[in-house]
Image (cartoon, rainbow, N blue to C red):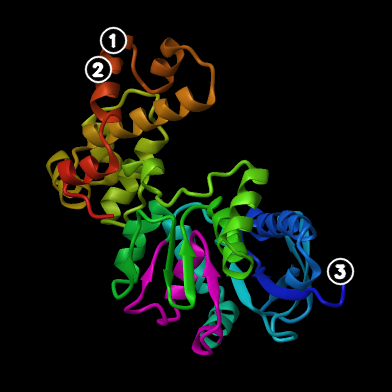
């Protein structure tokens, strides 16, 4: 780097339960951009200077076996701060983990108060929303958290289908790999669209994707609904390849079959049978896209014995777009 290079300081916040890949991926993206920037004339040259920062002072933080040497976020002004998602199992787990991030929440509240550029991804938008500073503003998060987000942060205008949403100094994104999209967004912001496109080509990433809709699996959206539904959903998710009866499900949930059906209709706009059909179709889609299993094997793993019968169910559900899912079942996400 020459003395004429202009440094763009990007902080990547690390904290005890952050998603490790989300803290690492942006640094790799900026490293590629820096390599490409070296071909620019000296007068136009700049360099991205990403680093891990912490709300807990200078610290070497271990997160599931990886060590992050982080600087106190207050040590040097930043051009932008990126907040990785929270590594969680489900929405209930996320809720508990967020409650333990009070230091990060307080720091982020102050950071937003000063109108600094803040970049959130995945479930970290929930952490920002807890500060109350997203009220009345537009944002997005991981599509499977949309119902949880709307219930807990009703004053935020959630655009769940969007991959990246900008509202003033706040930029938020969807699922885990959208961290790459956010890093590319920052590259365009500070170094231009041409560099963003070229960096995306090196990464073999679609630089023009803008929606989470193609990735949405409706049955996986974590609703945080009635306690009975949460019990039922977990029980069913563990038995997608097994036979079960309404009586068994109702007994597990400690309610009558009639009450169980009513709760499902109130919360999911689906019967338990239709809910399981949808889950099984989405599991079959994943098998088809990521394995070389035969149709017969996939059928068995999805809880069916007859390939022909399952094929009919698969075609019925798989052809629905996310918008058609919502229209058909009155879902809002």
Where 19 sits versus 49, above or below?
above
Position of residue 317 measured from the top left corner of the image (x, y, whole percent): 26, 29
CA separation in Å, label 1 and label 2: 6 Å
Where 214 sits versus 80, above or below?
above
Where does the magenta region start and end? 111-140
Q: Earlier in the sequence, mark 1 or mark 3?
A: 3
User: Neighbour class for label 3 at 10 Å: few (<14), some, many (≥20)?
Assistant: few
**Which residue is labeled 2 in the image?**
312
The image quadrant that residue 66 belongs to is: bottom right
**Which residue is labeled 1 in the image?**
308
Q: Confirm or deny contact between disc 1 and disc 3 (CB under 8 A).
A: no
At 40% from the left edge and 77% from the top edge, which residue is drawn?
134
Residue toward you, 144 or 327: 327
The image quadrant that residue 236 belongs to is: top left
- Residue 102 visible to the viewer: yes
Position of residue 133 measured from the top left corner of the image (x, y, whole percent): 42, 82
Where 296 sits versus 183, above or below?
above
The image quadrant that residue 244 belongs to is: top left
Q: Confirm or deny contact between disc 1 and disc 2 (CB under 8 A).
A: yes
Q: Is residue 125 magenta?
A: yes
User: Neighbour class for label 1 at 10 Å: few (<14), some, many (≥20)?
Assistant: few
């Amino acid at each position: 780097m020459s003395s004429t290079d202009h440094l763009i300081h990007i902080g990547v916040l690390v904290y005890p339960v952050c998603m490790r890949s989300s803290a690492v991926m942006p640094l790799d993206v900026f490293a590629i951009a820096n390599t490409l920037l070296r071909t620019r004339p000296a007068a136009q040259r700049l360099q991205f200077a990403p680093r891990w920062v912490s709300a807990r002072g200078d610290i070497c933080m271990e997160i599931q076996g990886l060590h992050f040497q982080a600087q106190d976020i207050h040590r040097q002004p930043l051009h932008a701060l990126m907040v990785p998602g929270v590594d969680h199992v489900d929405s209930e787990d996320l809720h508990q983990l967020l409650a333990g991030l009070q230091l990060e929440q307080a720091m982020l509240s102050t950071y937003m108060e000063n109108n600094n550029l803040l970049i959130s991804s995945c479930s970290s938008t929930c952490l920002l929303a807890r500060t109350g500073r997203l009220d009345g503003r537009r944002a997005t998060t991981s599509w499977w958290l949309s119902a949880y987000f709307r219930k807990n942060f009703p004053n935020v205008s959630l655009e769940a289908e969007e991959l990246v949403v900008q509202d003033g100094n706040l930029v938020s994104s969807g699922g885990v790999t959208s961290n790459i999209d956010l890093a590319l967004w920052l590259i365009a912001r500070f170094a231009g669209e041409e560099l963003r496109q070229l960096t995306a080509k090196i990464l073999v990433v679609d630089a023009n994707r803008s929606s989470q809709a193609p990735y949405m699996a409706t049955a996986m959206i974590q609703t945080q609904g009635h306690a009975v539904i949460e019990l039922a959903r977990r029980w069913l998710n563990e038995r997608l390849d097994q036979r079960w009866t309404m009586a068994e499900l109702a007994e597990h949930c400690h309610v009558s079959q009639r009450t169980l059906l009513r709760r499902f209709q109130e919360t999911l706009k689906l019967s338990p049978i239709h809910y399981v059909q949808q889950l099984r179709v989405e599991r079959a889609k994943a098998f088809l896209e990521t394995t070389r299993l035969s149709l017969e094997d996939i059928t068995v793993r999805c809880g069916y014995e007859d390939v022909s019968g399952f094929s009919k169910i698969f075609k019925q559900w798989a052809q629905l777009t996310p918008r058609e899912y919502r229209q058909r079942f009155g879902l809002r996400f």
